Image (spheres, grey):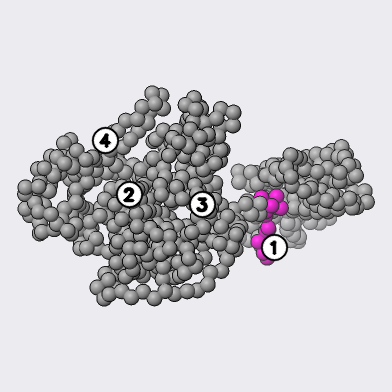
């Protein structure tokens, strides 16, 4: 057992091993009982005390074995030295076989061959130095400059050689083996090697985004006269408290993503914010797209009522119907297809100052195509000093597909979260998941009607036939209500799938996604606190429900999409900025099918007259 620190320190001098040297006196004759002997005899005591003195022994220190950590540090330092030595040799060899500076000055880039761009003038000034020249062979910088100055190359080579001599030496080996000693002698932190620093700088420079100068918009304020009843209703909406932050984000950014809970007031209040901020004073309109016709019509009437405007000023436009008038309309609600039709006639949408895309979480084909087109229209309008604002709104949107997709938006959009809800909604799961969900819905509605106070009940089913069947059973028992305080969610949805092998589309009834289930929950609690009854267990919700619904563009044949984009004179569909791009093979097969149907020209693969008639 190893002695303690106190025991080891006790009697330190006594435990030290010293060498005793005895000084020998000259021998003397001693007479003992008539015999003559010498003083060296051990049996006779010496006449005088012997003189002794201690001599400290100088022991050579034993070499300590390196630990595993120290050995790894030493190996790393030696590897770096070897790599630097090899790099210097390689650069020397490249400098020997490099072409002369006169020939190097005559070279130019070949990327603009065949284009009408003017060539840059070649700088023929060359420095006359005898030092070896170096070229940077970095894989990241694929573009080769048109002219290379030998002075810069030589200065870089000298500085790099000096850095190599200063970074790795015997002192680094000592610091690697004994970090405690090096830390005590140095006063500041040790800088990393130059190679790692350059790598960090290059990586950070690639992540940095270039800022776009947005033309300044004159400050304006439009006064709106609202009744006290409307003011009281608007004051209870959670989005009213975020009005300042939302308008500053829209004013300072071209693209804004707003994620708010259902019932927070996004669809009805954001157009009013923009109207009061003066986005319609210069003769332009505010456009709001809705995925359904009923939503476009109802939202237009609601916003017109709150702003105290006429239906000609706040109008709607759907297929074959609308109240839109070019002379008087300042806020326009429409479906996605109507705005896509306007893009065909006016690609830059010069009549609009701001576009709001509502319910972006549904990810229909029209919504994805519209977002891809607007991602290119917005920067073009900004370069022409006529900026167009784009606001994408949803409650359960997959934000990663818009932020991480650099092919869609070159600049990172501004994100605003509105987590508050106007009234709370309590969720109730079933203990067991029934097989016949229609009968379970009927039983649940009857139970709610008997035991709970009066109020509306909203039921989610998969199709029209199921709705008619349930209504036929419940029409005789329950009167119609205006307020929706209870939701009954069966958890099912009818989804259209396309089989790539057979080319047949089929409908399947399957579990919906968690995002869609949360959307259904938010339909209750609009006018009062509500309840949501889910006819499935929490285990089924956690295990079988996907996070988000897959986009429609992935589950649908792309022949219609290809033909629609061809009408917009978009030939290279592989380069189109889809939020979620379809399969490239499916696009190629769709083009071949359209060529066989004479909808596309086989030579140029562009739209001809027959395809225009088909799309009409």
Q: Which of 162 and 408 is in front in this view?
A: 408
Residue 346 numbered tag: 3
- Looking at the picture, how far across and down is residue 111, in whole percent? 73, 41
The residue tagged 1 is 185
**Of label 1 and label 2, which has the lower sequence position?**
1
Q: Return the disc, 3 or 2, that comes first in the chain's sequence.
A: 2
> Going from the N terminus, do you reach mark 4 or mark 2 first?
2
Assess whether residue 194 is covered by the magenta stretch: yes
Residue at left offset 49%, top offset 43%: 578
Magenta stretch: give its range: 185-200
Contact between marks 1 and 2 (CB within 8 A): the answer is no
Q: Of marks 4 and 1, which one's residue comes earlier in the chain?
A: 1
Q: Give the residue at mark 2.
A: 292
Determine crowd level at label 3: few under 14, some 14-19, many 20+ residues with C-alpha closer than 10 A: few
* Label 3 to label 2: alpha-carbon separation: 23 Å
Does residue 144 appear in the picture of this structure? yes
């Amino acid at each position: 057992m190893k002695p303690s620190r106190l025991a080891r320190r006790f009697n330190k001098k006594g435990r030290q091993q010293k060498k005793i040297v005895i000084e020998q006196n000259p021998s003397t004759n001693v007479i003992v009982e008539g015999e003559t002997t010498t003083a060296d005899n051990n049996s006779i005591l010496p006449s005088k005390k012997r003189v002794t003195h201690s001599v400290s022994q100088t022991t050579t220190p034993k070499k300590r074995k390196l630990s595993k950590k120290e050995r790894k540090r030493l190996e790393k330092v030696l590897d770096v030295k070897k790599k630097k030595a090899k790099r210097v040799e390689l650069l020397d060899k490249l400098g020997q076989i490099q072409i002369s500076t006169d020939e190097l000055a005559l070279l130019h880039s070949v990327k603009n061959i065949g284009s009408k761009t003017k060539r840059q003038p070649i700088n023929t000034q060359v420095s006359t130095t005898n030092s070896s020249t170096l070229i940077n062979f970095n894989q990241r910088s694929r573009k080769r400059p048109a002219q290379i100055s030998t002075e810069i190359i030589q200065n870089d080579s000298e500085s790099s050689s000096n850095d190599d001599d200063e970074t790795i030496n015997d002192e680094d080996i000592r610091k690697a083996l004994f970090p405690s000693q090096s830390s005590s002698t140095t006063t500041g932190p040790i800088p990393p090697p130059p190679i790692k620093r350059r790598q960090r700088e290059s990586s950070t420079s690639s992540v940095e985004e270039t800022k776009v100068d947005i033309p300044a918009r004159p400050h304006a304020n439009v006064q709106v006269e609202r009744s006290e009843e409307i003011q009281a209703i608007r004051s209870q909406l959670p989005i009213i408290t975020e009005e300042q932050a939302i308008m500053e984000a829209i004013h300072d950014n071209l693209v804004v993503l707003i994620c708010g809970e259902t019932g927070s007031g996004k669809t009805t209040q954001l157009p009013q914010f923009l109207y009061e901020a003066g986005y319609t004073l210069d003769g332009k309109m505010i456009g709001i797209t809705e995925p359904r016709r009923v939503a476009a019509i109802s939202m237009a009437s609601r916003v017109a009522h709150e702003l105290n405007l006429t239906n000609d000023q706040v109008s709607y436009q759907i297929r074959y119907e609308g109240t839109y008038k070019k002379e008087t309309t300042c806020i326009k609600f429409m479906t996605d297809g109507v705005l896509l039709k306007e893009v065909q006639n006016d690609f830059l949408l010069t009549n609009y100052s701001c576009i709001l895309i509502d319910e972006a979480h549904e990810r229909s084909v029209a919504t994805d195509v519209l977002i891809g087109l607007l991602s290119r229209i917005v920067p073009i309008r900004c370069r022409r000093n006529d900026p167009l604002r784009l606001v994408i709104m949803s409650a359960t949107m997959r934000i990663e597909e818009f932020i991480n997709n650099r092919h869609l938006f070159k600049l990172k959009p501004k994100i605003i979260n509105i987590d508050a809800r106007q009234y709370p909604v309590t969720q109730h799961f079933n203990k067991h998941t029934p097989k016949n969900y229609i009968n379970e819905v009927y039983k649940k509605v009857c139970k709610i009607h008997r035991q709970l106070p009066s109020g509306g009940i909203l039921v989610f089913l998969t199709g029209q036939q199921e709705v008619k069947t349930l209504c036929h059973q419940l029409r005789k028992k329950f009167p119609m209500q205006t307020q929706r305080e209870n939701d009954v969610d069966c958890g099912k949805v009818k989804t259209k799938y396309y089989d790539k092998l057979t080319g047949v589309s089929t409908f399947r009834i399957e579990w919906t996604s968690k995002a869609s289930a949360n959307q259904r929950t938010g339909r209750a609690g609009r006018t009062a606190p509500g309840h949501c009854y889910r006819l499935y267990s929490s285990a089924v919700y956690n295990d079988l429900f996907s996070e988000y619904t897959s986009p429609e563009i992935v589950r649908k044949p792309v022949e219609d999409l290809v033909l629609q984009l061809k009408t917009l004179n978009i030939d290279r569909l592989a380069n189109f900025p889809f939020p979620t791009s379809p399969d490239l093979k499916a696009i190629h097969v769709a083009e071949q099918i359209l060529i066989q149907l004479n909808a596309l020209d086989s030579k140029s693969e562009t739209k001809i007259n027959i395809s225009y008639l088909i799309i009409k």
